[in-house]
Image (cartoon, rainbow, N blue to C red):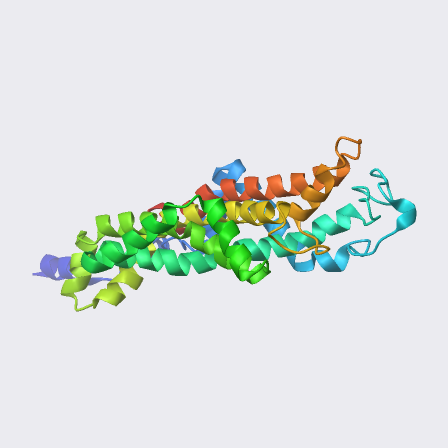
């Protein structure tokens, strides 16, 4: 009887303090910890995020830190080569190229971000709806995308800007329209694959409506591939804006913009003033290179399967 009572007492006794202290708390998988892991795992991704941060900072505070007025002409210093006073030299009007390149970062960055946000809202949600609902929604969205794809995309952008006027708003609209089929096709394919997945069926059985399933279940699961598309499209948006400016259909001079500056310096390369086109062209190349590298890192950041 005594042994039984002692055994029962031991079985219901609380665990020792040492055992309670040894219980391991689950790791805090915050977004910041995951972002630090993604950037440290791949040095190229970390470099891309660093370049992106630099571009964003220049776009934000660049116009306030430049050493010269980007619109001020100095006839005594026209076509001056790079020096300590003018780091990137001056153009044919004596304007400081370094200041113009830095100030132009804001305009090109705004064009890229605005056009990507617009086309993601239009093309991304249209593609998700087409892939999820099918039927006439799929046919309507697909035919619209096919109609846009029937035109050479840059020529279509030229026509839109020429018809609406060469303003920043119209450049953003034209860039969003020519990228619309890319987002529709990616979002439609991913939503079509996942609309019969187990988690969608479980959400339906739990009483969720179609729109809640689209926003809360389908969209988060296709965001990794969409982030890659967003990154690539930002680079293409900058190239498209620079191309339109190069042929005279983009931003109007004397506004600093990389495409305009390359066009202005192209005629001077033969005569030896190489710096006028080189530095804005290098800034354009670095920006596009950064956005192309950024895609894989953004995919890893938003991929739920990577947060383990």
Residue 304 seen from this side: no
Measuring from the top left, give residue 93's x and y in whole percent. 83, 48
Asked whether 204 or 92 is in front, the reply is: 92
Asked whether 128 or 272 is in front, the reply is: 272
**Left or right of residue 275, residue 252 in this image:** left
Measuring from the top left, give residue 51's x and y in whole percent. 60, 45
Residue shown at the point (45%, 47%) measured from the top left: 298
Measuring from the top left, give residue 237's x and y in whole percent. 52, 49
Residue 166, relative to residue 227: is it above or below?
below
How many numbered discs, if any?
A: 0
Measuring from the top left, give residue 121's x and y in whole percent. 40, 61
Picture quadrant where residue 252 is located: bottom right
Residue shown at the point (81%, 44%) measured from the top left: 92
Residue occupying the far left of the picture: 1
Asked whether 103 or 260 is in front, the reply is: 260
Picture quadrant where residue 219 is located: bottom left
Residue 176 seen from this side: yes
Residue shown at the point (43%, 55%) measured from the top left: 177
**Left or right of residue 44, residue 101 in this image:** right
Asked whether 202 or 5 is in front, the reply is: 202
Looking at the figure, which quarter contains the N terminus?
bottom left
Residue 275, relative to residue 58: is it above or below?
above
Residue 296, relative to residue 252: is it above or below?
above
């Amino acid at each position: 009887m005594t042994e039984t009572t002692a055994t029962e007492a031991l079985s219901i006794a609380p665990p020792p303090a040492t055992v309670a202290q040894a219980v391991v708390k689950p790791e805090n998988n915050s977004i910041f910890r995951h972002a630090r892991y993604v950037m440290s795992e791949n040095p190229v991704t970390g470099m891309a995020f660093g370049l992106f941060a630099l571009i964003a900072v220049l776009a934000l505070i660049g116009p306030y830190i430049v050493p010269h007025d980007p619109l001020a002409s100095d006839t005594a210093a026209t076509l001056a080569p790079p020096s300590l006073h003018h780091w990137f030299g001056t153009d044919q009007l004596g304007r400081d190229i370094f200041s113009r390149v830095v100030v132009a970062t804001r305009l090109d960055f705004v064009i890229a971000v605005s056009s990507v946000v617009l086309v993601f809202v239009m093309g991304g949600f249209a593609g998700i709806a087409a892939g999820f609902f099918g039927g006439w929604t799929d046919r309507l969205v697909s035919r619209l995308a096919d109609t846009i794809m029937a035109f050479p995309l840059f020529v279509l952008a030229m026509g839109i800007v020429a018809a609406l006027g060469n303003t920043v708003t119209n450049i953003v609209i034209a860039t969003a329209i020519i990228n619309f089929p890319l987002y529709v096709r990616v979002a439609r394919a991913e939503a079509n694959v996942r609309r019969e997945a187990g988690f969608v069926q479980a959400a339906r059985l739990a009483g969720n409506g179609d729109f809640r399933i689209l926003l809360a279940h389908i969209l988060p699961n296709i965001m990794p591939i969409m982030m890659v598309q967003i990154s690539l499209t930002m680079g293409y948006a900058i190239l498209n804006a620079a191309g339109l400016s190069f042929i005279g259909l983009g931003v109007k001079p004397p506004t600093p913009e990389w495409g305009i500056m390359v066009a202005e310096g192209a005629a001077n390369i033969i005569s030896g003033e190489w710096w006028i086109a080189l530095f804005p062209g290098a800034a354009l190349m670095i920006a596009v290179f950064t956005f192309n590298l950024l895609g894989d890192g953004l995919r890893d950041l938003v991929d739920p399967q990577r947060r383990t």
